[in-house]
Structure formats: C-alpha cells, structure tokens
Amino acid sequence: MSFSNQPSLGNWRHVGCFLIGLGVFFTTSLFLLSWWFTVYDLSTGDYRALGLQDLIVPAVLSVSAGIVWLAHRLLLRDKN
C-alpha cells in the first residue's frame, strides 16, 4: 500500500475559482446597472453629463478583473 498519493483538491479549486468569478461578475453587473441608472434618466430619456465621479467605473472594472485574475492565479496554480 502506497501513501505517496495525496488526495487531489483540484476539482474544489476549480469550483472555488468559478464561484469567486461568478460572485465578482454579479457584483460588478449590479454596480454597472446602478451606475447606469444614475447616468440615464428614465423619466425624461436624457443622459446627464459625465463627471469626475464617473471615473470610478473603469477603476471598478479593473479591480474586478484583478480579483478574478488573482483568484485564478492563486487557486489554480500547481501545488506540487
């Protein structure tokens, strides 16, 4: 009987990475939807002028992409 075979957690890492990515996707989607409703006025059908505070959108997208990249990098790296 050999004890050199370690149990594999690879499948759980894939599930964890998928769940983190799914959570980031839904959180970012809700943020973009709420931001869109501040830019577009449904009652008049007009857009407001973009301001300095709207620069948070590219920052949020960059942070979201960074979280997904970091989760992928840390969870799915080879542990050997």
Image (cartoon, grey):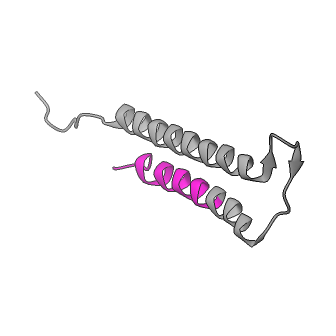
Q: Residue furthest bottom?
A: 52
Q: Position of residue 19 (x, y in %)?
A: 45, 37
Residue 67 magenta-highlighted: yes
- The answer to whether 49 appears left or right of 31 in the picture is right
- The answer to whether 22 appears left or right of 31 in the picture is left
Q: Closer to the camera, 50 or 77?
A: 50
Q: Closer to the camera, 55 or 18?
A: 55
* Residue displayed at 10% across by 27% down: 1
Q: Position of residue 15 (x, y in %)?
A: 42, 33
Q: Residue furthest left?
A: 1
* Residue displayed at 14% across by 32% down: 2
* Residue displayed at 82% across by 40% down: 43
Q: Closer to the camera, 35 or 1?
A: 35
Q: How many marks?
A: 0
Judge whether 8 appears above or below 36 on screen. Answer: above
Q: Closer to the camera, 74 or 20?
A: 20
The residue segment tinted magenta is: 62-80
Residue 10 magenta-highlighted: no
Judge whether 33 appears above or below 15 on screen. Answer: below
Q: Position of residue 74 (x, y in %)?
A: 43, 54
Q: Position of residue 23 (x, y in %)?
A: 49, 41
Judge whether 18 appears above or below 24 on screen. Answer: above
* Residue displayed at 48% across by 36% down: 18
Res 42 quadrant in image = top right
Res 45 quadrant in image = top right
Q: Residue furthest front?
A: 43
- The answer to whether 36 appears left or right of 48 in the picture is left
